[in-house]
Every structure is written in structure tokens, then in C-alpha cells.
Image (spheres, rainbow, N blue to C red):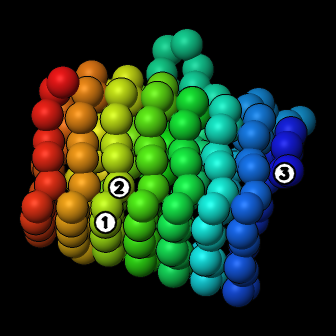
Amino acid sequence: VIEGNAIGVDNHGDLEMTGATLQHNAERTVVGRSAGPAFFNSGTANVSGSTFDRNGYRDADGIGHTHAIRNTGQMNISNSTISNNSGESVYEDGGDLVLDHVQIVLNSTVGITHARGHLTVRSSIIQNNVSDGIFVGGYGDYEGWVKILETAIIGNRGAGLRANVGDVTVQNSTISGT
């Protein structure tokens, strides 16, 4: 269990993580610095069988927030659950991210934000998030692509898929409001 840290995991090297639970990380501002994401990766990370639950914070005005996961490196997440997080749950910001058999459910804002880089979502469920299921375009200069394969994006309160820019491929997937 990785719990109660400003940043739960801050990886810049090579990391293999299996069966971990990250909870209640990045929930507040620490004196002199903001809380980071619960899991930050700029290296290479392979995560499997893990749970990211109740991480992050979001100010009442919605302006200040943290992420459960922020990736700028090479990251694979498989057979894992990302749920009940505040702020953006998964933020892809320039690396390569693969989500395979991942449930992203019941988060307080966007399920996945793709700002830049390469994102593959395969055989996953993105459901009942308070905002968009997947938001493509980020908040700055955009470059990269998104592939959504054999995935269910259902019951999110915003758009199932909001593709503002970029190259997005959807194959054998369901995007539904119910």
C-alpha cells in the first residue's frame, strides 16, 4: 500500500509494479509545494494488477487539481482499476501510454486526458466519470495519436470521447451515454 504522500510514486527510471494499491496520495498542498500526481512517470513503468483509489484533489472552483496518474515517459498499465479519484484521473503528457484491461470508473472529472504523445486503450472500461470519458487535445500544443480498441466508454456525464484535435482511431468499441 502506497498511501498519504504528496506524490505516491515519482518514477524516472525503470519500474515494475504489481499488485500495489495507491490511495489517498496527492490530496493536499504540502508546505512550499503543490501535491503532485499520485503516480508520476517520466521513465519506463510497467504496472499490473494495481488499484489507484481516492487520490488527488480538486479545488471547489475546479481550477486547482492533481492527477491520479501523469505520464511523460513509457508506461503500460494492465489489469488495474483507477477509481474514485479527484482531478483528472489519467493525464498523458508526451510519452507512450498503453492501458490494457483497465477500469477507469467513478472519477470526479475526466477519465483520460490526452495532451500529447501516444495513447492506446485496449479492452478497457471507462465508465461513470463526472466529465468526459476521454478528452483528446489537452491544454497546449498538441501532437500525437490515440487508439481506442475493443473498449467500452459508457455513462460518463460529459462526452464519451471529446476529440478536439489529433489523429484518433476507434475500433470495435462502444461509446454510449447509458
Q: Amino acid at mark 1?
A: Arg
Q: Using the rendered view, name the quadrant where residue 47 is placed.
A: bottom right
Q: Is residue 127 left or right of 78 when viewed as pictured?
A: left
The relative height of residue 148 versus residue 2 in the rendered view (above or below) is below
Q: Which residue is label 1 attached to?
A: 122
Task: Point out the frontmost of discs 2 and 3.
Answer: 2
Residue occupying the far top of the picture:
60
Query: Where is residue 80 drawn, in percent x and y?
Result: 56, 56
Whether pointer 1 and pointer 2 mark residues with C-beta atoms closer than 8 Å, the reply is yes
| Residue 34 showing in the rendered view | no
Say which residue appears at 61% left-offset and 77% top-offset.
Answer: 46
First in sequence: mark 3 vs mark 1? 3
Q: Which residue is label 3 attached to?
A: 2
* Figure label count: 3
Q: Using the rendered view, name the quadrant where residue 97 is placed.
A: bottom left
Q: Which mark is residue 124?
A: 2
Q: Which mark is residue 140?
A: none
Helix, strand or loop status at disc 3: strand
Measure the alpha-carbon separation of dots 1 and 2. 5 Å
Q: Amino acid at mark 2?
A: Ser
Say which residue appears at 52% left-offset and 62% top-offset.
Answer: 79
Query: Where is residue 49 drawn, in percent x and y?
Result: 63, 62
